[in-house]
Image: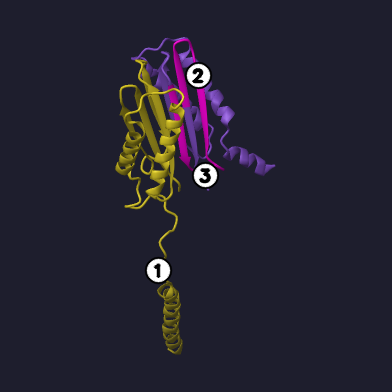
Chain colours: A purple, B yellow
Amino acid sequence: MAQDEDEEDLSFNVEEVQNIVRDNIEFCLGGNTYSHSRVPQWITVITEKTLTRLNKLNKPFKYIMRITVTQKNGSGLHTAAAYFWDIATDGTCTVRWENKYMYCIINIWALSLQM
Amino acid sequence: MADEEEVVDEEPEVAQAGSGDSEAGLSPVEAEKPLAPPKYEVRPRLGHKFQAQNVKAIILSTMKEQLTDRQYRADQAPRWAKMISNTVRQRVQDLDMKRYKILVQTTLLEMKGAGFKCGQRCIWDPETDYYTDELFRNDTIFCHTVVYGVYMY
């Protein structure tokens, strides 16, 4: 029982993180239109809020968070990623969000601190 | 008198016993081997750090190889993105930087006038962990690749 709890503490919980991220995006981008000058501010707010909450989870991970905000214009966007890591302990989480005016893609990578 | 002599005699004995003890205390230290250096490295050694300039060169050459003289095509772009990230990751692995975990992300955009902003934040150890990124542009394609190197203690 204690071991199960330990394993939960040590693994990367994708759903929990996705919920945290979605809340923050809704709060920040909500029904706004794309504005090139305000986007950096939104990005800062979202990343700092999300990372603070991730840190509070108190898990032994290093986090990398990347946000991409694109205006809806009919243009195509493709993303690919490749990793060289420990698949048993490290994890990734991607959240895609959109409203009428823009797309937002958030990637979070969690790299574990222990073997 | 006799007592004093005895006392005098005893003192040197005590002193000798004391020094004998201290000699016994000293000799094990001298006989011990010097401590071996710790094998658990918390920081990469000089020469084993993340080679940011080399990685930057790898990213740029890979993107140029794959994308020069190509026009954006919606059906092929996903394949190009995957190929670029896999190739970059393979070449960075060949640099053989010990104890580093590598993450590569490639983003391919069609140049149609849409606004695009990206940002990143990390919770990591700034003395051991690094990132490099590079852009590639032509008439219809905009490609951005970022490589993260995270040290594993």
Separation (CA) of disc 2 from disc 1: 60 Å
Start-end of magenta stretch: A77-106
Q: Chain of mark 2?
A: A
Q: Of the two numbered discs 3 and 2 on the same chain, state the one appearing first in sequence.
A: 3
Residue A16 percent location from the top left of the image? 58, 28
Locate residue A112 relative to residue B104 in the image: left or right.
Answer: right
- Tell me the number on the disc at residue A97: 2
Q: Chain of mark 3?
A: A
User: Please, is residue B44 above or below residue B68 in the view?
Assistant: below
Which amino acid type is shown beneath numbered disc 1? Pro
Separation (CA) of disc 1 from disc 3: 36 Å
Q: Which residue is mark 1?
A: B34
The residue carrying pointer 3 sits among few (fewer than 14), some (14 to 19) or many (20 or more) residues within 10 Å by Cα, namely: few
Residue nearest the observer in this picture, B22 or A87: A87
Q: Are marks 3 and 2 on the same chain?
A: yes
- Tell me the number on the disc at residue A86: 3
Which quadrant is home to the N terminus of chain B?
bottom left
The reply to whether dot 3 and dot 2 touch (C-beta < 8 Å) is no
- Residue A94 magenta-drawn? yes
Which amino acid type is shown beneath numbered disc 2? Trp
Quarter of image, res B9: bottom left
